[in-house]
Image (cartoon, helix red, strand yellow):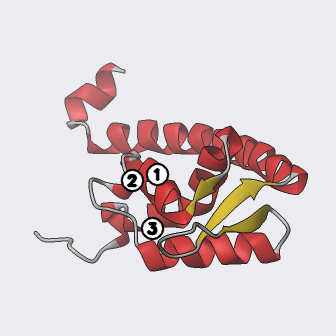
Amino acid sequence: MEFIDCPCTGKSLIRLVRPAVLTVLAGEPLHGYEVLRRIAPLRLFRGHPPDAAGVYRALRDMEAEGLLHGNWDLPEQGPAKRRFALTARGLACLAKWEDTLSEHRAALEELLTAARGALAPAGDREAS
């Protein structure tokens, strides 16, 4: 049975791009392409590069919300590049994300335990 487009594949984890961006920017200000490069190895992207347009849209939205501050780097040669830094509000948002993700992790562990129990052969369930 194929589940290519089913949410059960974990495709919705891409919605966690915002805490991923906040996390990498907590270390230092970065250009958008460097944000992409640093979040790409995260397991939530399931080995596929993050959608660049979506990440840049998230950067713009988070800047508009006051979570990030962007400055233009204007080199003598080459294109202008936007460098993003976390604001105090962004750091507070990341702290809230940490709480939220911890709660979700506990809820997911509980659900995973229940799912494993439901999938176990009947004899294994009775032995527990």
Residue 4: image location, x then y, percent:
20, 73
Q: Which residue is mark 1?
A: 39
Q: Which residue is mark 2?
A: 40
Q: Which residue is mark 3?
A: 12
From the viewer's perspective, tell me whether residue 6 is left or right of residue 57.
left
Q: Is residue 51 above or below residue 122?
A: below
Residue 50: image location, x then y, percent:
39, 65
Question: How far apart are the two marked residues, 1 and 3, measured between alpha carbons?
Answer: 16 Å
Residue placed at 57% from the left, 60% from the top? 31
Q: Amino acid at mark 2?
A: Ala
> In the image as oriented, which residue stretches furthest toward the left?
1
Q: Nearer the viewer, residue 1 or 14?
A: 14
Question: How far apart are the two marked residues, 2 and 3, measured between alpha carbons?
Answer: 16 Å
Locate the C terminus and report the quarter of the image it occupies. Answer: top left
Question: How far apart are the two marked residues, 2 and 1, measured between alpha carbons?
Answer: 4 Å
Badge 1 marks a residue whose secondary structure is helix
Q: Amino acid at mark 1?
A: Ile
Kindly check if marks 1 and 3 are in contact, taking CB atoms under 8 A apart as contact: no
Q: Earlier in the sequence, mark 2 or mark 3?
A: 3
